[in-house]
Image (cartoon, rainbow, N blue to C red):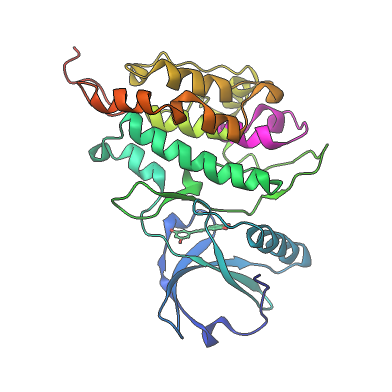
């Protein structure tokens, strides 16, 4: 159990303020080291001037304290001072999963995407078993553990909360492309809200394309509300029927019709070893999101 200490972090950890991890989209995450042990960690520094901002960080600490799973970043320690809070977390060094998608040299195969998606579903299933919603699942919140292995961890529990029946959620419309229809509609959020996001992430892993992205935010939001997406792009050529069905069962507008994390893990696309064997031995190991070089 981690509680925010009032002590100075410098008594226990050396924070490297010059090195920002993960592009710093979630505020500032720095490398740090526990002085007593030399253990490498990551420190997220959050400016908290108001009592409300402090409460939000306390919520994040409280949520992270309840989660213990290989596919969720682990909270290690926490500090609070007058103007900021610092979360000390497990250190991973593989960068964002999405930097790999756009990096053509990585050659993601359908089987790679299956392995990533299974781990995302395992992390989400654990959160949902603990009655916690993440509510901000998106590509930049999935980190790779290291450069070579295909292990991932979900980060950023800043919007996460205990599921409360009938709770509605106002969110910042900063990046509307990942919002579920019920969020756009300011309707009740629930476990399926996270599963929509898993659908968007899977779609992007398979193709490098964002399923609802329009030319502007209004267009994007309209695409989401109309549930306007397809698998017609050439990037999806060669994708298995099981993969097509999996994405379809998540990118469903009606939230009660989407499959849950446990159902997703039992879906043949993630669970059928014969399918995986077939994909492994397919003649052309064509990377997801890349053209078949033999195509015209
Ligand atoms: C790392 C390495 C890295 C980024 C992070 C951790 C960030 C984690 C994080 C966790 C949160 C959050 C924001 C960021 O709200 O490159 O080990 O709970």
Q: Position of residue 162 (x, y in %)?
A: 74, 49
**Looking at the rendering, in which quadrant would you find the N terminus?**
bottom right
Q: Is residue 264 above or below residue 293?
A: below
Q: Farthest front residue?
A: 274
Residue 295 appears in the figure: yes
Left or right of 193: which side holds 107?
left
**Looking at the rendering, in which quadrant would you find the C terminus?**
top left
Question: 222 or 287, which is in the foreground?
Answer: 287
Q: Farthest left residue?
A: 294
- Image quadrant in which you'd find residue 65: bottom right
Q: Is residue 81 above or below residue 278?
A: below
Magenta span dominant secondary structure: helix
Boundaries of the magenta span = 176-196
**How many marks on residues?**
0
Q: Position of residue 70 (x, y in %)?
A: 49, 54
Q: Position of residue 293 (x, y in %)?
A: 17, 21
Does residue 138 show up magenta in the picture? no
- Image quadrant in which you'd find residue 274: top left
- For image coordinates 54% across by 61% down, the residue present is 74
Question: 246 or 56, which is in the foreground?
Answer: 246
Residue 134 appears in the figure: no
Left or right of 253: which side holds 216?
left
Q: Position of residue 285 (x, y in %)?
A: 23, 26
- For image coordinates 42% across by 15% down, the residue present is 241
């Amino acid at each position: 159990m981690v509680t925010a200490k009032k002590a100075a972090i410098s008594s226990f950890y050396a924070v490297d303020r010059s090195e920002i991890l993960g592009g710093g989209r979630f505020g500032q995450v720095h490398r740090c080291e526990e002085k007593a042990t030399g253990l490498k960690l990551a420190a997220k520094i959050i400016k908290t001037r108001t009592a409300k901002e402090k409460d939000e960080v306390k919520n994040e600490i409280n949520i992270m304290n309840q989660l213990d799973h290989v596919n969720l970043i682990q909270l290690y320690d926490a500090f609070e001072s007058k103007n900021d809070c610092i979360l000390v977390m497990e250190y991973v060094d593989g960068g964002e999963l999405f930097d790999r998608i756009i990096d053509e040299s990585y050659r993601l195969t359908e089987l790679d995407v299956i392995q990533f998606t299974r781990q995302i579903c395992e992390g989400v299933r654990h959160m949902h078993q603990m009655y916690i919603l993440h509510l901000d699942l998106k590509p930049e919140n999935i980190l790779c553990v290291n450069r070579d292995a295909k292990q991932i961890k979900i980060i950023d529990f800043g919007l996460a909360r205990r599921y409360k029946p009938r709770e509605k959620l106002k969110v910042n419309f900063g990046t509307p492309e990942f919002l579920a229809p019920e969020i756009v509609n300011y309707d009740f959020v629930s476990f399926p809200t996270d599963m929509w996001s898993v659908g968007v992430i899977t779609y992007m892993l398979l193709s490098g394309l964002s399923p609802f992205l329009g030319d502007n935010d209004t267009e994007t939001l309209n695409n989401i509300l109309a549930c306007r997406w397809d698998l017609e792009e050439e990037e999806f050529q060669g994708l298995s029927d099981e993969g097509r069905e999996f994405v379809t069962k998540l990118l469903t507008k009606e939230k009660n019709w989407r499959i849950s994390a446990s159902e997703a893990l039992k879906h043949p696309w993630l669970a059928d070893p014969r399918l995986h064997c077939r994909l492994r031995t397919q003649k052309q190991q064509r990377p997801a999101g890349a053209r078949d070089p033999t195509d015209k």
